[in-house]
Amino acid sequence: MPVVHVRMDNRLIHGQILVSWNAEFKIHHIIVTNDKVAADPLQVTLLKAVAPIGATVSVLSIKDCVAYCNGPQADNENIFIIAKFPEDGLALVEVGLNMPVLNLGNQAYVRGSKKLSNTVYLTESGVKALKKLHEMGIRITCRMMPPDPASEYWPTVEKRLPDWAK
Amino acid sequence: MVGIVIVCHGDMADGLLDAARMIVGEQEGIAGVSLREMDAVEGLMERVAAAIERVDTGDGTLVLADLFGASPFNASARLAMQGDSKIEVITGVNLPMLLELAVHRDGETLEQLVEIALEAGISGIETLSQALALKTAS
């Protein structure tokens, strides 16, 4: 399977990805996907500059990311997708990405978000996106590092933020 | 004088500053910024920008980050790439690098300090057995 992991992380490419996750998978291609980031030339330049040895970095819109992953070039690669927010994950699936598992990485505080843990804050719209993904049968996990358990995280979201998860 | 800002994961920046204080004493115009696990890059950028403003006297600022491609570096790099003030970012900060910068800061330009930092940071990594072999051979 070309896409080995799909992670929502609003720090995008950072230490945990370059060190821990890169050691876990033999990543050939990191695709950072978020429409806003893809339209910011400064961030695109910087993200491409931090590619780990042996891997390339692409920064694509959600639509272009799905098109690439469903195209012939993706067959021979291990692709690690990093999007920013749960809403990006939902958009990836709605545009046509086959994604059995969505992993929540760092979701730092943004305005209006509520805390689930030191590393995960979710907004109402983020919770709604996760709910839709859950209802589509997509497994939601919450792993900062590879050794973290891959257990189903949706029940935690439902329990901690019941009003938003309704 | 060129300002220095150390940006690292966890307590490393404070730890480096504390260690440097033991060897070269209290330093002016050096600030530390810590990345905590709950931080967003944007929030970290604001704190690095505030630290740069505190130490920059008009001669530029040297940012020392711990890991290339990690959030402390990313936040600093974005500031350096978009900002109007003179900023250079070096990764792999270690104590030899910081000490050498502390004692050579006066009168050196940002470009000269970059050279000093790279030289000291790399040559500060040594192996006991090699040092023994080289220095006790005669």
Image: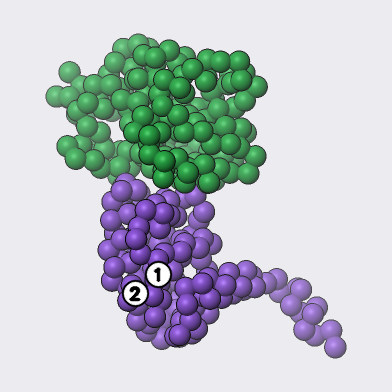
Chain colours: A green, B purple
Amino acid type, callout 2: Gly
Circle 2 or circle 1, nearest the eye: 2
The residue wearing badge 1 is B61
Pick whichever, A22 or B81, lies toward us. B81
Q: Which mark is residue B58?
A: 2
- If the image is split into quadrants, where does the C terminus of chain A sit? top left
Q: Position of residue B81 (x, y in %)?
A: 41, 54
Residue B27 vertical placement versus A81 (above, below): below
- Residue B11 visible in rendering: no
Q: Position of residue A140 (x, y in %)?
A: 37, 23
Disc 1 element: strand
Amino acid type, callout 1: Thr
Residue A26 vertical placement versus B94 (above, below): above
Instruction: Determine the residue located farthest toward the left in the rendered image.
Output: A163
Q: Is residue A124 left or right of residue A89?
A: left
Q: Position of residue B106 (x, y in %)?
A: 44, 85
Judge the density around disc 2: few (<14), some (14-19), many (≥20) Cα neighbours within 10 Å: few
